Amino acid sequence: MHTTVVKEIQPRVYEIKNNTGLDWDAAAAGLLSERLGEPPNLRSQRFERLHQLSKVPTPHRFMESWRRTDPAIISQKRFKLWNPEDEILSDTSTHDSDRSESPPVLTSAILSLCNAQQQSIVVEENAEDSGLVLASQDHTFRTQDTMSEFNSLIGRDIEEDDTPAFGLMNAVWYHGGYLLAVPKGSQILDPIWIRHRVNTPGHALMVQNNIKIGSESSLTVVIETESGGEIENYLNEITNIDLEPGAELSLIVINTGTSNSRYYSHLNVGQSESSNFEITWVDASEGWNVMRREVNLNGPYAEAFFRGMRIGSGEGSLELRTKQNHFAPATSSDLFYKSALFDNSSSIFRGLIRVEPEAAGTNAYQLNRNLLMDEGTKADAIPNLEILVDDVRCTHGVSTGKVNKDALFYMMSRGLNHSQAVNMLVSGFLTEAVDGLAEEDLKDYLFAKIEEGLSKFLGGKSVE
Amino acid sequence: MPNQILDLELDQYKYGFRDPEEYLYRSEKGLSAKIVEEISERKNEPIWMLDFRLKALDWFNRKPMPKWGPDLSGVNFDDLTYYIKPQEHGERSWDDVPDGIRNTFERLGVPEAERKYLAGIGAQYESEVVYHNLKEEWEQKGVIFLDTDTALKDHPDLFRKFFSTIIPSGDNKFAALNSAVWSGGSFIYVPPGVQVDIPLQTYFRINAEKMGQFERTLIIVDEGAFVHYVEGCTAPTYSASSLHSAVVEIIALPGARVRYTTIQNWANNVYNLVTKRAVAYKDATVEWVDCNLGSKLTMKYPSVYLLGEGAHAETLSVAYAGRGQHTEAGAKCIHAAPHTTSTITSKSISQYDGRTSYRGLIEILPGARKAKSSVVCDALILDPEARSDTYPYSYIDESDVEIGHEASVSKISDDQLFYLMSRGISEVEALSLIVRGFIDPVAKELPMEFAVELNHLIELQMEGSVG
Amino acid sequence: MNDSKTSEFVEVGTINDFPKGNGKRVMVDGHAVAIFERSGSYYAVEDSCSHQHAQLAHSAIEKDGYDLSITCPRHGARFDLKTGRTLSLPAYRGIRKWNLKIEDGKVLVDRKPMVDAAHEILRLEVESR
C-alpha cells in the first residue's frame, strides 16, 4: 500500500510547499471552479455531475471489462486531489532537458503546461490573424471573449457505457486544461505544439481539454505529455474534439511516463459531414495506462484514421480501448496499432467497430499486431464488431507472437549480427505503424522518438 | 421468378407435421423436486443419480440468468413439460418400433440413411431412445454406443467415473437445468486403438407442444482411438416457446481423435441453449463441426480444454439467422499445456432481420509455451435489417506464442452477382452459389447427406430473398 | 516432500472452533486456508478455487465410499478433500493443501503447503475393467 506522504524526494529537484491535498468533495469542486474563475453555470454543472457520480458504481476488477487491468490502482482511496496552491519548485538545470528544447519544426503556436497550469505561451502572428484561439483554462476566463466559445464544451457529459465513473470524476474536479479553437475557413499551416508536464506526487490531477475545428479549416496539433516522477501520481485527462463539416485535424500524441505514472485518458471525437480526423501516437510510458479513444462519425463522408505504436517496458501496462462508431452513410475508419513489449509489460487492446443501420456504405478496418520480446510480457486482444447494416466492408485482425525467426535468420545471413538484426526488425515493425503520417518532418521526429525508446533495450541486448 | 415466396416458415411445413400425441407418460408442467424425483423413479435410477439431480435442481434455482448476450426473457420455465416417455423399452429392430413413431422417421428419411452404411442409429423420440441398432462388429471390439439411460445401468462404473467431470451442474444455469432433468442422449466409449470408420448418428425431435429437450451425451475415447459422432435434428413449428438445453461432454484421452458434427434446424420458436465441452489430453484432437440453421435463439459455444502437450482443437461452424432469429455461436479454446494448437473457422449469414453473433475465447494460460492459435470469422449480411456481431476475446499469458485472429463482415458483392448472372445463371442460383462458396470450408467437412441437406436449405432461403 | 524434522506447525484454534461436518477459513502465513471436519478427521486445503478464486470454506462435504470431496459454490468444480486434486472442470488444476495434526484438542497446521495437487492437471483415466 502506498502512503500519500511525500518523503525522500531529492530536495535538489523538487520541493513541495503546503502538502494539503483536497478531498473528493463538493468543497473541492467549488474551490477549483473559483480558482479558474468559472462562470456560475459551469460551477453548478460540476455539482450536477457530482450528484450523477454518487449514483454510478465504482469500477472494480470483477467487472468483465476491467478483468485485465485493476482500476483500484486509481481509486479515490489512494489519491487525494492535487491542490493548485501547492507549488513544485523544480530545478530546471539538468533534469528536463526536453522541456527547454524547441520543437523540431516551425510552429504556429507553442503552449507549455505544468500540472494544468500555463507556464508559457507563444502564438505566431499569422495564426492569431487566422483567428486561432489557444489558451490554458486557468487563463481563459480572464478574457471574456473566449469564454462563449468553449462554454458548451466544458464539462460535457460523455456517454460511457460501462464505467461512467471516471468521466464524471473528471467533470466534477477538473483542474484545468487547454482550449484550442479554429474558426471556419482557416488553414493553419504550421502545427500547434502543446507540452504538458505532469507531476503531482501522491495526488490526482484532473485535466479537461477541448478542441474545436471550424468548417473547412485544417490544423495539425502535436501533444507531448510527460507524466510521473519519483512518486506515484494519477492523471485523469479527458479531451473533447469537435470537427465541423469539412474540418481536418491531424493529432500527433507522444506519451512518456515513469513507472510511477498512473494515467487514465479519454479522447472523444465528434465528426460532422466530410470531416477528416487522424491521430498518430507514440506511447512509451512505463507506468499504468488506460487510454480510451473514440470517434463518432456523425455525418456522411467523415473519415477517421488511428495509427499508433507502443513500446512496453518495466511493469508498464496499457489498456487501449477504441471505438469506431459509424452513424452516417459512406463513412470510413481505419485503425492500425502495433506494440513491442519488453520486460514484464503488457498490452490489452479492446477495439469496437460499430456500424448503425443508418451507416450504409461504411468501410471500417482494424489491425493490431503485438511483438512479445521478453518472457514476462502479455498481450490481450478483444476486437469487437457490431454491424447493423448490410452494405459495409469491415475487417479486423490481430496477431501476437515473437520476432519472426525466418526474418531474423535472413538478416543475419546478410551480415548483421543478432542484435542488429533484431533492432532492425523491431524498429521496422514499429515505424510502419506511423508511416501513414503525411508531414515528413513530424514523421522523422516520431521515428527518432521510437529509436530512442528502443535503444534502451536493443542497444547491445541479445533477445532470443 | 417464382410466384410464391418460400420463406422459412413455409419451408418448415416440410418438416412441420405432427403425429397425434400417443405417449405413455407425461409429467406435469413446471419444474420442482417432485418432478425430478418422478423422472428418476420412472427411469429406475440408482440413488446417486437422484441425489445428483436434486443437487442440480438446487444449482438451477440459485443461478441467475446470464446477463451478457442475447435476450432470454421469453423463456418461461414454469410453462414447460420436462419429461415425456413414449415407450417402455429401447428396441433393436426397426420393425419393432411403433407405427406412429416409425412414420415420423420414414418421413425424416431415416431408413434411407440406414441403407447408406450408417453403423448405429440411436433414434430419440421425445425424451427416450426408441430404437437402437448397434452393429455386431463394433460390439466385438468393445465399442459401446447406447442411450445414456441404458449406459447408466449397464456400465455404472465407467459412467460414474466420467459423468459431470467436464461440465459440473454448477457451470451455468442451463447446464444445471439439464443436470436435473436430463433424459436420453448418447453414451459412447471407444477402447484403445479402435478406429470407428463410419459415423455414429442419432436423430431426435420435439413433438409435443411446450416440450423441452434435455439430452445428455457423454463420449469417452480411449488412447489412440477414433470416432465421429453426428447429431442432426429437426423440429416442427409451434406457437409457444420450446426449450432445448443439451449438455455434451467429451473426453479425448492421449492420442485419441474425436469429431462431433451437429446440424441443427430447430423451428423458429425453439430456444436452443447448449453447453458443449471437451478435454484433449496429450497429442489428442477434438473437432467440433457445428451447423446452426434454425431456432429462435441459439447460444452455443463448443469448447476445448487442451490439457496435454501437443493437443489440438478444431472448430468449424456455420450459422444462419433468418426472420426473427438470433444465432449466437462461437468457440472457446483454453490452452493449458505447451505445444498445443487451435483453429477456429466461423462462417455466418444473416438474412431479413436475422442476427448472427460470434462470441469466442482463446485463453493461453501461463506455461502453455509454443501455443498456436488461429481464428477466422467471416460474416455475410444479406439484407439491410440484418445484423452481425463479432466478439472474440483473447487473453494471452505466455510470451512464446503465435496467435492470429481475422474477421470480416460484408454483403454479397454486386460484381460477383453480375458476373454469374451474365453467364446465364438465375439470380437465385447465383446467390446460392455464392453463399455455398462462402460456407464451403465448413460444409466440405460434413457427411454427404448433411451437405446435401444444407445446400438444399440454402437454396430455399435464397429463393425467399428474391422476387 | 515435507520433512517432519523441518516442518513447523502453527496453532489455528481448538477443535471447538471448527464446526463439525463443515469448513471454516483461517489464515496461515498470509494464506487463506479452509479447515474442514468430517467424522472426527480434519483436512486443510486452500480457501481459493483454482478457477476464479472463489472461497471454498462454506462448501458442503460429499462422501463417496472412502473419498471425500468439496464443491466450489461458484461453478461447481470439485476437489478431493484429502489431496487437493481437482476432480472436475472448470478447475483444470488442483489446489494446495496443508498437513495438520490435532494435539491436546488444538488444531495445528504445517506452515509449509503441499503444492503437488495445485500443479497437477485434471486426471481422467479408464482403469482396466
Image (tube, grey):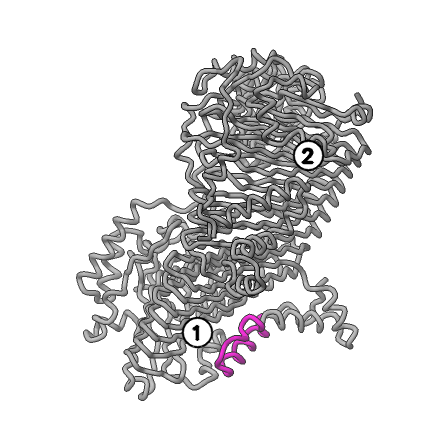
Q: Position of residue B350 (x, y in %)?
A: 48, 49
- Tell me, yes or no, whether the two marked residues, 1 and 2, touch with CB atoms within 8 Å: no
Q: Residue A106 carries which label?
A: none
Secondary structure at badge 1 equals loop
Question: Tag 2: residue type?
Answer: Tyr
Question: Tag 1: residue type?
Answer: Asp
Secondary structure at badge 2 equals strand
Q: Is residue C25 visible?
A: no
Q: Is residue A17 visible?
A: yes
Q: Main secondary structure of the magenta part?
A: helix
Q: For marks 1 and 2, give the CA distance.
A: 75 Å
Compared with B188, B334 (above or below) is below
The image quarter containing residue A375 is bottom right
Q: Is residue A448 magenta?
A: yes
Instruction: State the residue in front, B366 or B317.
Output: B317
Direction from residue B440 to residue B379 in the image, left or right: left
Give the chain of mark 2: B
Q: Position of residue A158 (x, y in %)?
A: 33, 57
Q: Which residue bears the numbered disc 1? A: A91
Q: Which residue bears the numbered disc 2? A: B229
